[in-house]
């Protein structure tokens, strides 16, 4: 089969505490899609996280690409995808968002749609329902934005002065379940207070004032008080007095992964600390990826 090109999409987190549905950060775990000429839609997975994925056009990458092509009055050419991913599924690290972004880029390349980055964001946000994960995967780094009246708005910045330790439980948590545990309404005073935390968090993130950012992260009133009831690791951290090298921690997206933001010079010590605290979880440093999704074209045949 002739290889056409390769798509690389970074993982992402959403919310970052009180930045509910509006703040995202990209990380250096990736979905890699190698695209080959083929006479039908097919794919194969080459990593443990992809063991049970659909291998035909019902795969989310193909579903997205076919839909995007159709919306632009095109038919997606048949192809074969070789997939690799170190993004765990249903753990709060944007696995579905990476697939959606990958599908949009697949259609853009195969159908020669010439979609701009902003146009790709609009499509991805409409499919995902919010822009934080897909925005981070497309743009890289820190993204802040909203989705209103069918339009996504985004601002992007880089983050360079912090390390992140990912605490990834072995159990899965479907986003719909994590959404259903949230209340239909919250008290007006809590909304005002949590909004003020979010505003200050954004300022601190843009300045990379990690002491202040960490303080604001833990004050969320929008979702973490409810989701800590189904994510034991988050509940445990909220009850502990943590070492000074831990700036703050957040539930990653809908969970169950928890991210700890720590000082760069103490990352190794922090990783060991969290491994001892959560021996049944995968605990490792996860670096912020300041570049978004990429396409690399091939001139070789395999």
Image (spheres, grey):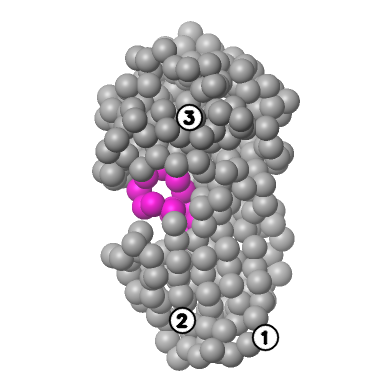
Q: Nearer the viewer, residue 31 or 274?
A: 274
From the top left corner, tell me how far across and down residue 13 is, in percent. 50, 41
Q: Are marks 1 and 2 in contact (CB under 8 Å)?
A: no
Residue 193, x across and y down, in percent: 53, 11
Q: Nearer the viewer, residue 28 or 73?
A: 28
Label 3 residue SS = helix
Residue lying farthest to the top in this orientation: 189
Q: Where on the picture, by quarter, is residue 106?
A: bottom right
Left or right: 294 with respect to 180?
A: right
Magenta run includes residue 91: yes
Dot 2 surroundings within 10 Å: few (below 14), some, or many (20 or more)? Answer: many
CA separation in Å, label 1 and label 2: 17 Å
Residue placed under numbered mark 3 in the picture? 270
> Where does the magenta region start and end?
87-101
Tag 2 residue:
80
**Is 213 situated left or right of 174 in this image?**
right
Earlier-in-chain disc, 1 versus 2: 2
The residue that label 1 is drawn on is 299
Q: Position of residue 206 (x, y in %)?
A: 71, 29
Residues at marks 3 and 2, CA–CA distance in whole angstroms: 42 Å
Residue 232 can be seen, yes or no: yes
Of the two numbered discs 1 and 2 in the rendering, the one whose residue sits closer to the viewer: 1
The quarter of the image holding the C terminus is bottom right
């Amino acid at each position: 089969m002739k290889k056409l090109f390769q798509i690389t999409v970074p993982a992402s987190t959403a919310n970052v505490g009180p930045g509910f549905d509006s703040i995202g950060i990209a990380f250096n775990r990736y979905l890699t899609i190698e695209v080959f000429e083929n006479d039908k839609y097919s794919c194969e997975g080459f990593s443990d996280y992809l063991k049970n994925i659909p291998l035909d056009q019902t795969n989310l990458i193909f579903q997205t690409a076919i839909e995007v092509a159709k919306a632009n009055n095109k038919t997606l050419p048949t192809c074969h995808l070789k997939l690799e991913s170190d993004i765990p599924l249903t753990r709060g690290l944007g696995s579905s968002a990476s697939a959606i972004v990958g599908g949009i880029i697949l259609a853009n390349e195969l159908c020669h749609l010439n979609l701009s980055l902003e146009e790709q964001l609009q499509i991805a946000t409409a499919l995902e329902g919010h822009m934080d994960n897909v925005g981070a995967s497309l743009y890289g780094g820190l993204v802040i934005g909203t989705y209103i009246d069918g339009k996504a708005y985004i601002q992007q910045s880089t983050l360079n002065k912090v390390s992140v330790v990912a605490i990834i439980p072995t159990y899965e948590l479907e986003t719909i379940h994590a959404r259903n545990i949230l209340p239909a309404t919250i008290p007006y005073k809590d909304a005002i207070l949590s909004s003020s935390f979010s505003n200050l968090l954004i300022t601190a993130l843009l300045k990379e004032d990690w002491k202040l950012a960490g303080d604001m992260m833990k004050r969320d009133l929008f979702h973490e008080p409810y989701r800590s009831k189904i994510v034991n690791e988050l509940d445990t951290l909220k009850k502990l007095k943590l070492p000074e090298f831990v700036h703050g921690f957040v539930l990653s997206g809908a969970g169950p992964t928890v991210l700890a933001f720590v000082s760069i010079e103490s990352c190794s010590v922090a990783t060991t600390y969290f491994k001892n605290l959560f021996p049944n979880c995968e605990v490792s440093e996860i670096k912020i990826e300041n570049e978004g999704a990429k396409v690399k074209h091939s001139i070789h045949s395999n």
